[in-house]
Amino acid sequence: MQENIVKIEGLSHRYSKDWAVQDVSFEINKKGIVGLLGSNGAGKSTTMNILCGVLSQTQGSVLIEGIDMRTHPEEAKKRIGFLPQNAPLYLEQTVDEYLTYCAHLRFVDKRKIKTAVSEVKEKCGVAHFSNRLIGNLSGGYRQRVGIAQALIHRPMLVVLDEPTNGLDPNQILEVRQLIKEIAIDRAVIFSSHILSEIQATCQDIIMIEGGKMVFRDTMESFNNYIEPDSLITTMMTPPALSVLQQLPGINEVSFLSDNTIRMHFDPTADIAESIVEMSVRNGWRLKEITLEKSSLDAIFAQLSNKKTKPALPS
């Protein structure tokens, strides 16, 4: 039987009287990217800090390749690469100096350190900056160096906390591609509060809100699971706002331009068909109608009131 890469059971933690995480349980049994999604303050960073041995949990257990993080922290940490939200970089060191230092910290065999440094520089695309001070690198290349330090000891699990935060659009695309390449031969946990980042990068998703896990499944299942809650219509001769507000199932209506209207509706109502029929009947000259997915806040509200999905597939 294959050993879990990660197994978390009944994880709970509180600061003073407030619970930051409550009864979180999940397993990761395969290579690839798992997205950890949650709004700011949802409990993502607490979960990751406990997972990586930075913080000791109040309750529950964390196993990394079968090793208990609480009872054998050193052995468990050897199997994890971690990039916190604020990368632990020494700006006065060169890329080579820093990665060599990290290799020593990670107990890489001294005879293999030079090779290990070369490998991660090449993988992360920073080999041409070997002798450059980290403080003189752009934000995107600093992030690549941060990812390189998480790979230096060849861990089976890499945990990345908001790895694209603060990068420009081109840098984001580059880091996304790098993470996908890293995940070919290891498991990666990618944390973000931005839904589009998770959707663009991850195969599986875990959602935490209010310290509780509200969803865990594949990204495909997630995209099919979330119901649309609004639509955008373009009409050449649209009716007055008051006419649309009176339609059954419509909760809110707003004009985005003279001919473009957003309508929020009850997901149980067949609004699109009604709009098409009424446009034909009343001469509104409907040109386009597009369903919109829920906002992230609306998704959390939906999922918090529904039973969580089954465990991630192995």
Image (spheres, rainbow, N blue to C red):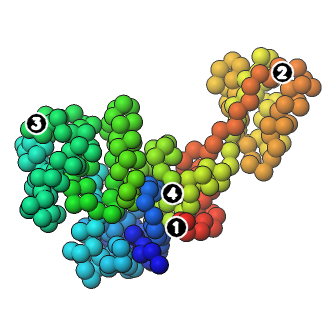
Q: Earlier in the sequence, mark 1 or mark 3?
A: 3
Q: Which of labels 4 and 3 is toward the front? A: 3
Residue 239 placement (x, y as % from top left): 80, 23
Q: Which of labels 2 and 4 is toward the front? A: 4
SS class of the residue under badge 4? strand
Q: Which of labels 3 and 2 is toward the front? A: 3
Circle 2 sits on which residue?
Answer: 284
Reply above or below: 80 against 101: below
Amino acid at the residue labelled 2? Trp
User: What residue sits 28% from the left and 67% below the top?
Assistant: 79
Measured in 3D between alpha carbons, the distance from the residue under mark 2 to the one under mark 4, in whole angstroms, is 42 Å
Q: Residues within 10 Å of mark 1 (few under 14, many from 20)?
A: few
Cβ atoms at labels 4 and 3 below 8 Å apart:
no
Q: Which of labels 2 and 1 is toward the front? A: 1
Quadrant for residue 218, please give it: bottom right
Circle 3 sits on which residue?
Answer: 132
Residue 290 placement (x, y as % from top left): 70, 33
Circle 1 sits on which residue?
Answer: 314
Residue 205 placement (x, y as % from top left): 51, 57
- 264 vs 176, left or right, is right
Measured in 3D between alpha carbons, the distance from the residue under mark 1 to the one under mark 3, in whole angstroms, is 42 Å
Q: Earlier in the sequence, mark 2 or mark 4?
A: 4
User: What residue sits 89% from the left and 25% below the top?
Assistant: 280
Q: Residues within 10 Å of mark 2 (few under 14, many from 20)?
A: some
Q: Earlier in the sequence, mark 3 or mark 2?
A: 3
Reply above or below: 297 against 80: above
Measured in 3D between alpha carbons, the distance from the residue under mark 3 to the one under mark 2, in whole angstroms, is 63 Å
